Amino acid sequence: MCELCSELRDALNDIVLNPEVPGFTLALQSYWAQQEQLLTPSCVVQPRNATEVSTIIRTIVRFNAEARAPGGIPCQFAVKGGGHGHVPGIANIKNGVTIDMGAMKAVTVNRGNTLTSVGAGAKWLDVYSKLDTLGLSVVGGRLSGIGVGGLLIGGGMSFFSPLFGFACDQVDNYEIVLANGQIVNANAREHPDLWAALKGGSSNFGIVTRFDLKTFRTNGIWGGTVVQPVQTLPQQISAFVSFNNASNYDPYASVINTYVYSRQNGWLVSNILVYTKPQASPPALEPFAVIEPKVLNTLNVRNLSSMTLELNQFSPLGARQLFVTRTYGNDPDLLKEIFATANTTLQTIASVPGLQYEVVFQPLPPAITSRGAATGGNVLGLDPAAGPLVIAEQGISWTNAADDEAIASAAKAVFDKVDQIAEQRGLSHNWIYLNYASEWQDPIASYGRANVVRLQAASRQYDPEGVFQIFMPGGFKLFAKNDTGIIP
């Protein structure tokens, strides 16, 4: 039991939930991954504004400073935005304090319709349902149930990324509570080093309480899901590589090429095709649209709320989850090797109850990686000169904790083998997308040494005591740690 909870109740009684109250159970049930649902904190705190977040942080820091005395027991904490993380402990904590930002989900648009301010507890449906009615949009998530905060501080892939870059590149301002409880803004004018660090540096610097997002006009999209037999894989891979390699890349077009296995259906291909204009059958996506036969086809003109709700239905709450990702060159033979390796390795886990196994390819062309420089830069470390890359991901869901080790071992084996092949063919790339990374991966290091040094400098500047490195253990950290604290 974390004694910090009693001090938080003294300071903020009505927003601190004990395990005995119904709201506590509801808070845990709202996590996407079963691994997060089953962690039981000593209390859940649900702040309503940045001032209350500041009070929480000040209380945590004071308590842990006193707990460092002989006989004291420090108390760790976690921060939950949308609760869609797959890494155990990234947004919840056993026997600690979970700060649940869900009450802070207001979405407001400024008078000029140029900025949308979003509370850190909002999900993307909260944003799109507001903006769709105004004919506006922002660069954001692709599933309605994903949290705004986690996506943005981890980089953020979006249907609008080919036009505007990563979602983090379009954050005009972060309101953030620092380790000393101070509430500051980080933008191009105030704390620009912190502003840049938050564009991919994750939760290492404080608790973001509001995102101010650049906003633009839109009058709808064309998009949907197309499901096809796995026998169409050669045409799929050919269309994908050509799309990603196009010298005149259409910035309105997006593709997510997924191979889905379940015991019920075997392998199927599921393409998510989106054109961010209300233009049916655009030429850039025609190579995918003409592949036959189709088992399911939901392509139509619609708004982002409709599109993201459709995709979210394929991602229900409550299963155990694992993501792992790598980045490779845009090569058709290598992509076929990835699928073949996954299919072979799958046989070792095919009997696991509740298994659904996905191999996902997403384009990462210079159209995306070149955008960040024009908006103040980010820390992701991607160079457009690398040419078109592919984000490869394994997404696995299953039912029982007893199968965790087998699932992780299989996922590792796939990319271990593919890494060797890619290295031999000159198609390897070090970058790891943080929002898809597994707990054994180090996405921060993949940003390159210069960006790691930059992030560490920001941490020392804004969190000199290492509060978010030591007392918030979840997520991907900037420093190695030992029993005495941070090792630069």
Image: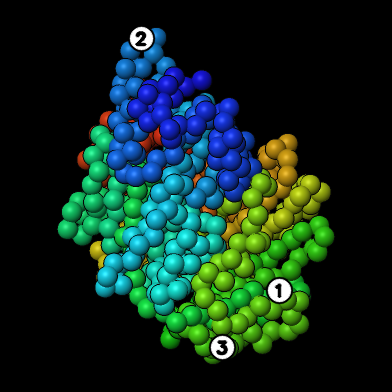
Q: Nearer the viewer, mark 1 or mark 3?
A: 3
Residue 40's spot in the image, x, y percent?
57, 31
| First-in-chain label (2 vs 1) | 2
For the C terminus, the image quarter is: top left
Q: Which residue is mark 1?
A: 227
Q: Identify the image quadrant of residue 485.
A: top left
Residue 261's spot in the image, x, y percent?
74, 61
| Nearer the observer, 452 or 463 | 463
| Nearer the observer, 333 or 316 | 316
Q: Which residue is mark 3?
A: 280
- What residue lies at 64% left-to-right and 74% top-to-bottom? 225
Q: Amino acid at mark 3?
A: Ala
Q: Which residue is mark 2?
A: 70
Between the residue at mark 2 and the residue at mark 1, the CA separation in whole angstroms equals 61 Å
Crowding at mark 2 (Cα within 10 Å: few <14, some 14-19, many 20+): few
Q: Callout 1: helix, strand or loop?
A: strand
| First-in-chain label (3 vs 2) | 2
Q: Amino acid at mark 2?
A: Pro
Between the residue at mark 1 and the residue at mark 3, the CA separation in whole angstroms equals 18 Å
- What residue lies at 42% left-to-right and 21% top-to-bottom? 6
The residue at the far left in this view is 189
The residue at the far top in this view is 71
Residue 81's spot in the image, x, y percent?
46, 48
Its colouring scheme is: rainbow
In this rendering, is residue 163 above or below 339?
Answer: below
Q: Callout 3: helix, strand or loop?
A: loop
Between the residue at mark 3 and the residue at mark 2, the CA separation in whole angstroms equals 68 Å
- Asked whether residue 77 is in view, the answer is no
Q: Identify the image quadrant of residue 293.
A: bottom right
Direction from residue 365 to residue 110 in the image, left or right: left
